[in-house]
Image (spheres, grey):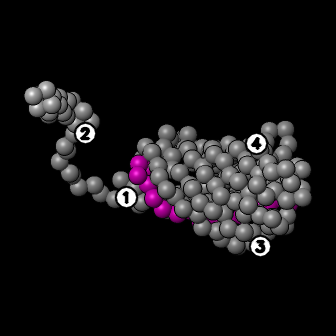
Amino acid sequence: MKKQASFPWGMIFCLAIAPVYGQYYENVEPHAMVEKVTRLHFFYHDIPVGNNPTTVLIAHANITDNFFSPSPFGSLYAMNDPLTVGPDLTSTVIGNAQGMYIALSHDPAKFTAVFYADFGFTTGRFNGSSFSLFSRYPPTDYVPSPGTIREMAIVGGRGAFRMAKGFALLRATSSNATTGNASLEFNVTLYHY
C-alpha cells in the first residue's frame, strides 16, 4: 500500500513543478526581419613594437625565444589595434579591433594565424556597434606582394550589426618584416538585421 501511495504523490509533485520550471521562454509571434547589407572600408594598424604597442605577446611555445625568432609558431598575441579612415596611422581613428590571434606558421618567413577580434566603432553612424571576425589568416609572406587580397569570415555583431555574417577582404598597405608593424586595408561586407 505504501508503494502505491508514493506513486500518485510523485506524479502530483512532477506535474506541480513543471509549470514553475517550464517558463524560461515566451511564445513570441514571428515578424518579418529585413536583411540589410552594409559595406565598410577602413584601415587596421598592427604595431607590436615601439613606445606604444597595440599588440603584445602573451604566451609562446618553449621553442619560441622572442617575438619573431626562430619561428612564431604557437605564440598567442593580444591586440587592441586602431582602425582609421585612411592608410596612415595619423588619420582619423574610427574605432579599434580588440581580440587575440595565435601564430601557426613553422616557416619564419611566412605568417599564418587564427584570429578572433571584435571590430568596434567609436564614432560616426556606427558608434557603439561592432562585428566579430573569427577566421584563419592564410599563409602570406611577412612582406606580402602588393595587391594580394586575403578573405576572412565575419561571424557575428552587435548594435547596428546585430546577427551579422559576412566577409572581410584584406590587403596589406604596409608591412615591416623586422618590426612586425603592418597596416591593412579592410573592405567588409556585412549582412545583418
Q: Residue 170: x and y, percent?
A: 64, 64
CA gap, disc 3 and disc 2: 53 Å
Residue in the image at 70% along x and 73% along y: 147
CA gap, disc 2 and disc 4: 41 Å
Q: Which residue is mark 4?
A: 58
Vertical side of 114 occupied by 144: above or below: below
Does residue 179 appear anywhere in the picture? no
Residue in the image at 48% along x and 43% along y: 129
Q: Which residue is mark 2?
A: 25
CA gap, disc 1 and disc 2: 28 Å
Point out the stretch of residues depicted in magenta. 161-177
Name the one closer to the observer, 103 or 85.
103
Q: Which residue is mark 1?
A: 36
Name the one closer to the observer, 87 or 5.
5
Residue kind at label 2, given as amino acid type: Tyr
> Circle 1 sits in a helix, a strand or a loop, which is it?
strand
> Circle 4 sits in a helix, a strand or a loop, which is it?
strand
Q: Residue 160: x and y, percent?
A: 42, 47
Cβ atoms at labels 3 and 2 below 8 Å apart: no
| Mark 2 nearby-residue class (10 Å; few <14, some 14–19, many ≥20) | few
Q: Residue 132: x and y, percent?
A: 53, 51
Mark earlier in primary sequence (2, 4): 2
Mark earlier in primary sequence (3, 4): 4
Residue kind at label 3, given as amino acid type: Ser
Q: Which residue is mark 3?
A: 145
